[in-house]
Every structure is written in C-alpha cells, then in structure tokens.
Image (spheres, grey):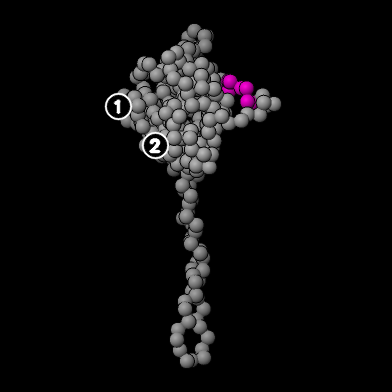
Amino acid sequence: MSAIVASNLESAQAAGLFDSVLGAQADTASAQAKRRLWRIREFTTVQLLAREAGAPENQHPVRLNVDALRLALGQFKAIDSRGKPQALFDADELAEISEPIAQAFANAEPGDDVLLVSSARREGFLAPPTAVTARLFIEGGNLNFIAHDSAFDFVHIVRSTSMSPNFISGSRAKASDVKLASAGAGNRRSDWLTVPLTTATTAPVAPPPPPLVLAAPPAAATTFATPPAAPPVVAAPVPAPAAPIVQPADAKADEIERRLTALKQLRDKGLITDDEYKQKRKDILQAL
C-alpha cells in the first residue's frame, strides 16, 4: 500500500486533491452511492466499467476535491500537428465534468476504471463539436489519465450514418496518437498523464488589500505642547476604465466576415443544411 493510502485523513485533506482515502464509508440508503453512469448531456458521459484485463487493482474508492480536480484537468494540453499546445478542455467542460468524475471515483471499486467522453465546440460556436475520450484510475498514488482522442470528429459519423459513434477510451496496453502535456502532471507515456495525489493543487489565495489609512507615525520626542499631525490618508485607487463592450466598427465588421466565412465552409462541407445556413447567416447579419 502506498504512502498516500497509509497517511491519515488530515494529511490527505491538506494535500489538496484528496478529501479522504481508501475505504470511504458510503451511505447505503443513497442511490447516488450505487450510481455507475453520469449522462451529463448528449455525447458527454462519465461511466464506471470493469478495469482492463490484466491490469492491477486500482486504489479505489477515493474522494477527490472537486475544485482541485478541476484545476488539475484545466492544466492538461493536447499538442496539435504543428506542435502547438491547446487546452484539452474548455472552462464550460471543466464545470460540467469535474463533479461527476469525483462522484465516480467515490463509487468506484478496485476493479473499476472511470471512462470519460466529453464533447464541446472548442473551435467556436460555428464549428462542430469534437470529443475527448479517456480512461481514468487511481494507481501508484497518482490520478492516471490516458487519452484515446483529443478532438474526435464524431458529428460527421452521426450525420452520414445516423448511427451512434463508437467512442474508444485510452488503454494501458496500447498508446494512442494523442500527445498530452501538463505543468502539474508527469508523462508516463505521450498519451498518459499522472497527477500526484499529494500535490497541493488548490487555487492560490490572494493577498489581503492594503489598508486605506496609513498607521499614525510615532510621536516625536519634543517638549512643545503642540498636537501631533494627523496621519496622512491614502486615497482609494481609481479603477481603470472598463474596456468598451461594443467593438469598433472595423473590428466588428472583420468578426462578422470571419463568422460568415466559417459558416459557408460548414455548409460546403455538408455539416449544416441550407436552412441552417440561411438562418445562421440571417442571425449574424442582424448584428450589423
């Protein structure tokens, strides 16, 4: 048993990612404790399934700190074909999937893996959604994350075949083509990240603001009976003017032209219908 499991509950909580350790007691009266599938929305799910054949037992169940988990996942990057790192998840995705993943680990047995499918329009609202598919488990005192896809284009399959896409999770035995990186994790393999459970990943605490009034200076040694001068008062800082909500005319025109071009490309590729194209084009032009 690893040191992380042997540590007491207090030290585990202080670690940031752990809230408790193996063997957390579940409320048997709660249906949540028996849950194995979290269908967040269409094409976004978290599921408990049997671990891969031949894999050692996982260190489940565990209770993960949801905020720390979200921060850890938020540092994950996928390296694209040009060698440029891109965020694996956007902010809305992280808000959706972090709590279900934490709940899945709380319900998991040593023989379970956590499988993730998360879809989002990462290239903008006009682009079709793509999916991240991954396998997660706790082993060796680490949160392990193995990706099979970082941007699976499943929409084309759905539109052309009217069939549900086959989402494939990452595998311990075989590496995928995905290349991952993270400042807060190690790479066991190019598609496999490990996040230490003992690493404090909570958000930094902002320092308190300085006092508005400076402390009074010490009284000078003098025999004069004059009253001490009043302490100087520091004026509150004047906030910088907010950025304008409305874009300049040139920038706005450029943005609308870019959106119309992207919309036409989607129609030409058959990813949206002519009716959808006309409606979206009308909506964009109304912004003028």
Residue 53 among those drawn in magenta: no
Q: Which range is magenta?
A: 32-40
Q: Amino acid at mark 1?
A: Arg
Residue farthest toward the left in the current orientation of the protein: 82
173 relative to 233 in the view: left or right: left
Q: Is 147 situated above or below 8?
A: above
Q: Amino acid at mark 2?
A: Gly
Residue at the image point whose x is 43% and y is 39% from the top: 199
Residue farthest toward the right in the current orientation of the protein: 29
In the rendered image, which quarter is residue 134 located in?
top left
Q: Residues within 10 Å of mark 2 (few under 14, many from 20)?
A: some
Q: Count every numbered label the image shows and give the total.
A: 2
Residue 218 position, x and y percent, is 47, 78
Residue at the image point whose x is 37% and y is 37% from the top: 183
Residue at the image point whose x is 54% and y is 35% from the top: 20
44 relative to 251 in the view: left or right: right
Residue 169 position, x and y percent, is 45, 18
Q: Earlier in the sequence, mark 1 or mark 2?
A: 1
Q: Is 161 situated above or below 254?
A: above
Residue 265 position, x and y percent, is 41, 20
Say whether residue 263 is visible: no
Q: Secondary structure at mark 1?
A: loop
On-image quarter of the N terminus = top left
The residue under label 1 is 82
Q: Secondary structure at mark 2?
A: loop
Q: CA distance from mark 1 to mark 2?
A: 23 Å
Residue 36 among those drawn in magenta: yes
Residue 184 is tagged as: 2
